[in-house]
Amino acid sequence: MQEFIIYTDGGYSTSSNVGSAAYVILAAADGSLVKKDSFILRNETSQRAEIKAILAALYTIPDGSRALIHTDYLFAVLSLHRPPRRKNQPDADLLLRFKKLVRQKQLRVDFKWVRSHDGDPWNELCDTLCTEALAEVEAHQAYR
C-alpha cells in the first residue's frame, strides 16, 4: 500500500468572487515531493475550495493508497468522515463526493488539523499557491 502525506488549502477573493485551491502531495516514506497543484474555482468559498483541494489530491493518488491529510480547515477534519446530517447541510454535496471517492478508490484517509499561518512549510506553500492563483485571476481581470 502506498502512503502519502497531503497538505491542502483554499482561498477566496471577494473582489473577483473567485476561489482557489491547492494541494501538495508528499511520499510518506521519505517526504519527497510527489506533486503540487493549484486551481481556480468560480463562485466558490474558501471552505468549499479547501474540500475540493482534498478531493483533487485524492483523485491524484493511486487506488488502494493511504493518505494523511493536513488541513487548516477544522470543519474538514471534523466532518468528512461523517455522513451529512441533513440534505441542506452546507457542503453536503462535497461530503458525499468525498465518501464516494474514498469508497471507489479504496483509500484509507486520516486527517490532521494544522494551525493556519503558523510556519508549517507545506501548509505555507499551499497558501502561497492559492494566493498566486488568485493574483493571476485578478491581474487578468484588471486587463479587461
Image (tube, rainbow, N blue to C red):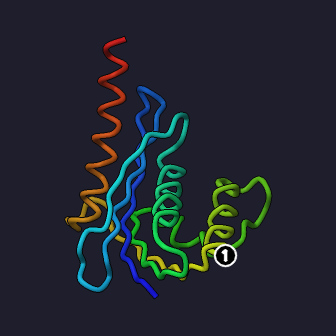
Kindly identify the amino acid type of the residue bearing the numbered disc 1: Arg
- Estimate the x, y position of residue 135 in percent, counting from the top left: 29, 33
- Estimate the x, y position of residue 55 in percent, counting from the top left: 53, 61
Q: Specify the quadrant of the image occupied by residue 36.
A: bottom left
Q: Residues within 10 Å of mark 1 (few under 14, many from 20)?
A: few
Relative side of 66 to 118, left or right: right
- Estimate the x, y position of residue 123 in percent, counting from the top left: 29, 63
Q: Specify the quadrant of the image occupied by residue 101.
A: bottom right
Q: Which residue is mark 1?
A: 103
Q: Specify the quadrant of the image occupied by residue 131.
A: top left
118 above or below 91?
below
Residue shown at 46% from the left, 56% from the top: 53
Report the front residue among 39 and 14. Answer: 39
Residue shown at 35% from the left, 36% from the top: 134
Relative side of 64 to 2, left or right: right
Residue shown at 25% from the left, 57% from the top: 125
